[in-house]
Amino acid sequence: MGRFALLRQEVEQRPPVAGIVASDIMDLPENLRLVFNKMARQGPLTVGELAAEFGLAPDEARQIGDGLVAKGYLKTEVREADGETLYRLSLARTRGLRPPPDRS
Amino acid sequence: MSKIISVHSFRGGTGKSNTTANLAALFAMEGQRVGVIDTDIQSPGIHVLFGLGEDDMGRSLNDYLWGKCDIKETAHDVTPRLGAAIKGKVFLIPSSIKAGEIARVLREGYDVGLLNDGFHRLVEDLNLDVLMIDTHPGLNEETLLSIAISDALAILLRPDQQDYQGTSVTVEVARKLDVPRLLLIVNKVPTVFDAAEVKARVEKTYNCEVAAVLPHSDELMTLASAGVFALRYPAHPVTGLYKQIAAKLMA
């Protein structure tokens, strides 16, 4: 299975979330975890940077990025300086002392 | 380029806050602009080391997380309180010590994205060379976030079986979160222990560099967090070890 197909499958297998917390990053498959770690440390990535991190063509990286946005793991923003789309981590609220929401 | 450094331990009482305060002071003595953020929202304490009392505390991290102010407004310039010739700056971002505010965060939680943004905004707004994150012990979402965003992580442990086991867990987490620089600090070591032997054993156990083996110090215990040890005792051997840790964290 090619890299793009593998990543697409990994994204499709992720449950939808209302944002992620740091512990979620640890549960990600390695391909995704490495990129999420980079985003956590260095901030949002452009499509080109995402493509470089994943080893994909830009269009493929956009599909993966958009898939993760749809699942609630990332969100997009537009960089004012040049109108470039950026993907950044979509971080959730902490859950307080109440029982965590049922994610199923 | 700015650096974010987290100081963490699996168990409480290992000396995180003291270590963080000492490292921050040493960085500032070298002329660096240092931010220290107390993310131990449940049991804040590092403000004591910097001489900041409840009456002196204006805005806190809690106010920022509840959207009451910008993160910059929570930064207290504690440099004048340090009582030493410091070429740089130390800004402290304290967590609230009011019981009601601590309880509110525990009860309601907060926006982790806001905390994450706050870390990066502090570096930019205060033009920091170093942002030190003093963490709550153990693994929770705040400590994992701190680890995830840090350029360097110092994990403290005492020569104690509970600490040894817990450090295994923390090292594993740090490696999963790809922390670029990971160092261990063995603290409160009985003076009868051979430091070199402790260092070698811990390094072999965790396959991780030990930045320093800090012996138990009566002077440090007597100071009892009433000030920053390295500034009170600049020539003490423990201060020399703090300097060693500082150098390794910035390498």
Image: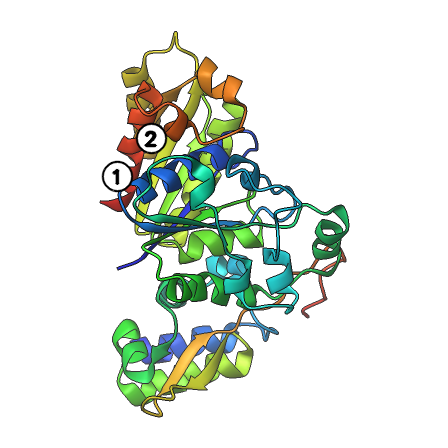
Amino acid type, residue under disc 1 in the picture: Lys
How many discs appear? 2
Label pair 1/2, CB-CB below 8 angstroms: no
Which callout, 1 or 2, points at the residue further toward the start of the chain? 2
**Nearer to the camera, A47 or B17:** B17
Query: Disc 2 designates what residue?
Result: B242
**Nearer to the camera, B99 or A98:** B99
Q: Is residue A11 above or below residue A59?
A: above
Question: How many neighbours does mark 2 have within 10 angstroms: few (below 14), some (14-19), or many (20 or more)?
Answer: many
Q: Given this view, does label 1 or label 2 mark the residue nearer the observer? A: 2
**Nearer to the camera, B70 or A11:** B70
Q: Measured from the top left, where is residue B6 in percent x and y?
A: 42, 47
Q: Residue at x 33, y 86 (%)?
A: A60
Q: Residue at x 75, y 51 (%)?
A: B103
Question: How many neighbours does mark 1 have within 10 angstroms: few (below 14), some (14-19), or many (20 or more)?
Answer: some
User: In the image, which disc is placed on residue B248?
Assistant: 1
Q: Is residue B10 left or right of residue A44?
A: right
Amino acid type, residue under disc 2 in the picture: Tyr
Helix, strand or loop at label 2? It is: helix
User: Dot 2 falls on which chain?
Assistant: B
Q: Residue at x 63, y 66 (%)?
A: A93
Q: Is residue B41 left or right of residue A65?
A: right
Helix, strand or loop at label 1? It is: helix
**Nearer to the camera, B51 or A99:** B51
Q: Measured from the top left, where is residue B235 in percent x and y?
A: 30, 21
Q: Measured from the top left, where is residue B175 in percent x and y?
A: 37, 48
Which quadrant: the N terminus of chain B?
bottom left
Q: Is residue A80 above or below residue A38?
A: below
User: Is residue A2 visible to us here?
Assistant: no
User: Dot 1 falls on which chain?
Assistant: B
The answer to which quarter of the image holds residue A32 is bottom left
The answer to which quarter of the image holds residue A39 is bottom left
